[in-house]
Image: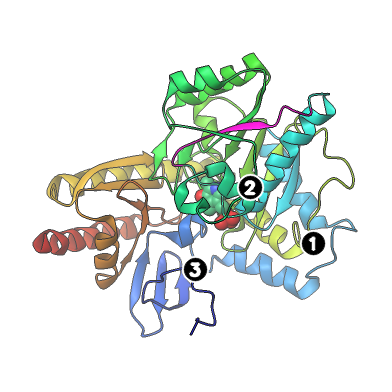
Amino acid sequence: MIASVLPTYSRAPLTFVKGEGSWLVEADGRRFLDLGAGIAVNALGHAHPALVKALTDQAGALWHTSNLYHIPAQQKLADLLVEHTFADTCFFTNSGTEACELAVKMVRKYFYDKGQPDRTEIITFSGSFHGRSSAGIAAAGSEKMTKGFGPLLPGFTHLEFGDHDALTAAASDKIAAIMVEPVQGEGGIRPLPDQCLKGLRDLCDEHGILLILDEVQCGVGRTGKLFAHEWAGIAPDIMMVAKGIGGGFPLGAVLATEDAASGMTAGTHGSTYGGNPLGCAVGCAVLEEIADDAFLAEVNRKAGLLRQKLEGLVAAHPDVFEAVRGSGLMLGLKCKATNTDIVNAGYTHGVITVPAADNVIRLLPALNITDDDIAKAVDLLDQTATVVAGHG
Ligand SMILES: *Cc1c(COP(=O)(O)O)cnc(C)c1O
């Protein structure tokens, strides 16, 4: 008999009932150090007082009105994002994959309005992840996500990640956009080097191609800049945001330049819940904490500390781990042992990590994790690796 919850996930045997900072409490009382943060969502940890206050204050005042009316929290969040980024305008969604849907629509409408209605092709890369909607799975294109779900949304050209020659050959005045994650998350914490991101920007400029960055996982302070592309000193035309921006409340956004967004006039797009008062109140509180030079400097300092300790961990367990990679507090341990075995062994030692493709485990802690918890985390991973090595 089918489970009452549609069984699309194979879940770990863990049921968390409470969260405090970087710690999760299981129903049986065990405490777990959370290095997954709900897959880079709980950017400020669990139950951050400023976020709890923003949510409960808004909940006591007004939950929902619809986008038929002005929404003060939405206006405030849009103003904050415009102030702190390349963007001139924002549309709010409830998830990353909805941001992908709008990014694709925005690109198509842009070229349609420019008198190039056939210019619809979007280049994407192997190992990418853009969510589970029809556009998201067609964009990523991997068999794992698309098999059985055809016919797929047309309009995507899939290239091998890192194949410069293929990219240069494919880029032309017929391509509408290039969509890429500055750091691949699901694909195994694979950062795009800064010079490649710069090269992509140049290639787009040369051919009039729009650059869409998917910063759903790597954005909102995760890499130590507010958005990861800032490290390369470039700006996209369109950017997808979600996960960390809501700090745990479902919230996403598409940010765009005035030019890229020029086709999206009244009536061309909408969402019942997108930009609702609750989500935007929390989003404002998240940004007020993270879009701050002192906060981001701390993220970079902590990232350096964690990375240094992880290098030691890898050196101490050469049969279990191969290398550390990633950017800021978006780190991956490339494994020699099977990544899911390490993640599962971590559960018995009270540490939560997240597997990714390419036999990697992801470490995506809260951006405000304490130095003590960083030391504790590496200690727990060390115990975990010792046990995994013993079994190997
Ligand atoms: C998680 C993720 C998405 C999809 O976001 P959802 O909120 O699950 O729809 C899209 N792109 C990237 C890079 C992601 O990590």
Q: Disc 1 marks which amino acid?
A: Thr
Q: Extreme left residue here? A: 390
Viewer-nearest of labels 1 and 3? 3
Q: Position of residue 115 (x, y in %)?
A: 83, 24
Q: Which residue is mark 3?
A: 8
Binning the other alpha carbons within 10 Å of mark 2 as few (below 14), some (14 to 19) or many (20 upward) gives many
Disc 3 on helix, strand or loop? loop
* Placement of 353 over or under 303, stated as above or below: below
Disc 2 on helix, strand or loop? helix
In the rendered structure, the answer to whether residue 373 lies left or right of residue 76 reads: left
In the rendered structure, the answer to whether residue 16 lies left or right of residue 319 reads: right
Residue 108 in view (yes/no):
yes
Q: Position of residue 99 (x, y in %)?
A: 66, 48
Q: Is residue 131 magenta?
A: no
Q: Disc 2 marks which amino acid?
A: Ala
Q: Quadrant of residue 372?
A: bottom left
Q: Are marks 2 and 3 in contact (CB under 8 Å)?
A: no
Q: What numbered label is drawn on residue 135? A: 2
Tell me the CA gap for discs 2 and 3. 19 Å
Tell me the CA gap for discs 2 and 1. 19 Å
* Placement of 388 over or under 288, stated as above or below: below
Q: Position of residue 10 (x, y in %)?
A: 41, 69
Residue in view at x 68 percent, y 72 percent = 56
Viewer-nearest of labels 2 and 1? 2
Q: Disc 3 marks which amino acid?
A: Thr
Ligand 1 within 8 Å, label 3 CB: no
Binning the other alpha carbons within 10 Å of mark 1 as few (below 14), some (14 to 19) or many (20 upward) gives few
Q: What numbered label is drawn on residue 125? A: none
Choose the circle earlier in sequence order: 1 or 3: 3
The magenta-colored residue range is 117-127
Q: Are marks 1 and 3 in contact (CB under 8 Å)?
A: no
